[in-house]
Amino acid sequence: MKLIIAIVQDEQTPKVVKSLMSNKYRTTKLSSTGGFLKSGNTTLLIGVENEEVNDVIDLIKEECTSKKIKNGNKEVTVGGANIFVMDIDQYKKI
């Protein structure tokens, strides 16, 4: 079993969650704030079987797009998603 942690921009979160739910993937949604631009984002926790990891990542990719914005004199890319995949030794629903 794997735990996918996906950090998504707030504006893209509804599309991502809707896509995951439509494909029968349950998710836990946590509000969070990014440190770099202090912009709002959402952290999604998604528990899946090993063989489902790529499917979930593909769904997130389809809904998340990145864009370039000005930060002072610099142009930075924001959006998209930061995704972490972790091994889970044990899962229990009580």
Image: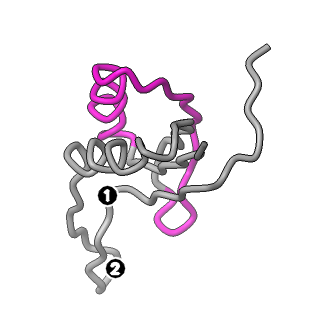
The type of residue carrying mark 2 is: Gly
Q: Which residues are magenta?
A: 10-38
Q: For residue 72, which numbered disc appears in the image?
A: 2
State which quarter of the image contains the C terminus: top right
Q: Residues within 10 Å of mark 1 (few under 14, many from 20)?
A: some
How far apart in space, not on screen, are marks 2 and 1 (Cα)? 18 Å
Residue 35 colored magenta?
yes
Spot the residue most to the front.
Answer: 51
Identity, as a three-letter code, of the amino acid under mark 1: Gly
Q: Position of residue 22 (x, y in %)?
A: 28, 20
Which residue matches tag 1? 79
Instruction: List x then y, in percent, for residue 43.
Output: 53, 43
Q: Position of residue 35 (x, y in %)?
A: 57, 64
Q: Nearer the viewer, mark 2 or mark 1?
A: 1
Q: Secondary structure at mark 2?
A: loop
The quadrant the N terminus occupies is top right
> First in sequence: mark 2 or mark 1?
2
Residue at screen point 51% across, 37% down: 48
Locate residue 90: give its quadrant: top right
At x 46%, y 53%, the residue is 39
Note whether 6 is above or below 13 in the view shown. Answer: below
